[in-house]
């Protein structure tokens, strides 16, 4: 092993040494007060940095750190014939370099976490906006002067309600089953034209109740509900769990 054992303190703290270097350094640090002191300092510093890694840094942090690195003079490579005992100045310089590297790593991780959290906020905002639009659409249909409300019992207990508006060319469908399907099954809606069914939406797997907006439903003859595998089917599975005539 050609590496000076004194210079392994930073790599040892970051667990960046091989097995031979680890054994050599652990044996050395038992007898070297200077390296032991430096080891304690580095461990304390890295622990403090880890505590703040998951906080969201300001957007300018990474830019400022990278700019500071560009202005900082790099240390020259260690001399191959360095004495066994390092001066305090040399240890401080080596400690500063390791700390700077840790700061860069923390800044990079913090920036990544910030981006992830920022994306989550945007996603949540989009979901909230979509929910508001859906609620407004439902209220608009239910407020239509030509609204017609029809109901039908659900097989096994419950009610299927269809509130349709010709002027809106849409209907609000409310399904409430007394018995929810299994987790691998789902209720599916079908708009029926004559004897031809068409998919009108699939509920969440295992859900026994839901409210949906079905466009174009007033032009259909009926709305039916079947129990299908989770994710829905291309054609309805008999028997119908509920059916509302729209004519």
Image (tube, rainbow, N blue to C red):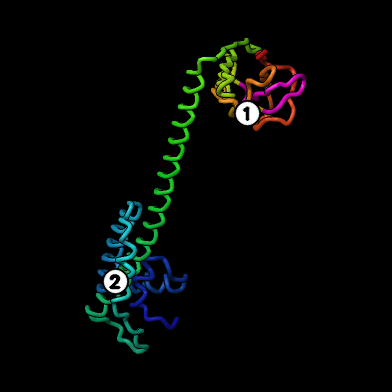
Q: Residues within 10 Å of mark 2 (few under 14, many from 20)?
A: few
The residue range painted magenta reads 181-199
The earlier-in-sequence mark between 2 and 1 is: 2
- Let me know if residue 182 is in the magenta part: yes
Circle 1 residue: 202
Q: Nearer the viewer, residue 46 or 184?
A: 184
- Let me know if residue 38 is in the magenta part: no
Circle 2 residue: 68
Q: Is residue 10 left or right of residue 140?
A: left
Query: Is residue 14 at all visible to an observer of this figure?
Result: yes
Q: Which mark is residue 125?
A: none
Dividing the picture into quadrants, the one containing residue 203 is: top right
Q: Residues within 10 Å of mark 1 (few under 14, many from 20)?
A: many
Q: Is residue 75 above or below residue 206?
A: below
Q: Is residue 63 above or below residue 150?
A: below
Q: Nearer the viewer, residue 113 or 159?
A: 159
Q: Is residue 34 above or below residue 110?
A: below
């Amino acid at each position: 092993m050609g590496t000076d054992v004194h210079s392994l303190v930073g790599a040892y703290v970051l667990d960046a040494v091989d097995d031979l270097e680890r054994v050599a350094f652990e044996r050395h640090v038992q007898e070297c007060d200077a390296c032991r002191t430096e080891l304690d300092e580095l461990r304390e510093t890295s622990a403090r940095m880890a505590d703040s890694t998951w906080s969201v840094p300001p957007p300018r942090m990474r830019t400022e750190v990278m700019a500071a690195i560009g202005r900082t003079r790099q240390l020259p490579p260690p001399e191959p014939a360095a004495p066994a005992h390092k001066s305090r100045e040399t240890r401080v310089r080596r400690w500063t370099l390791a700390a700077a590297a840790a700061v860069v790593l923390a800044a990079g991780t913090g920036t990544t976490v910030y981006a992830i959290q920022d994306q989550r906020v945007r996603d949540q905002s989009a979901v909230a906006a979509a929910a508001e639009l859906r609620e407004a659409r439902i209220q608009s249909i239910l407020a239509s002067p030509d609204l017609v409300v029809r109901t039908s019992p659900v097989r096994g207990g419950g009610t299927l309600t269809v509130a349709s508006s010709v002027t809106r060319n849409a209907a609000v469908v409310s399904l409430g089953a007394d018995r929810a399907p299994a987790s691998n099954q789902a209720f599916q809606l079908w708009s029926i034209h004559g004897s031809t069914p068409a998919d009108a939406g699939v509920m969440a797997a295992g859900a026994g109740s839901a409210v949906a907006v079905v466009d174009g439903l007033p032009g259909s003859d009926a709305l039916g509900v079947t129990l299908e595998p989770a994710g829905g089917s291309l054609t309805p599975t008999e028997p119908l769990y509920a059916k509302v005539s729209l004519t």
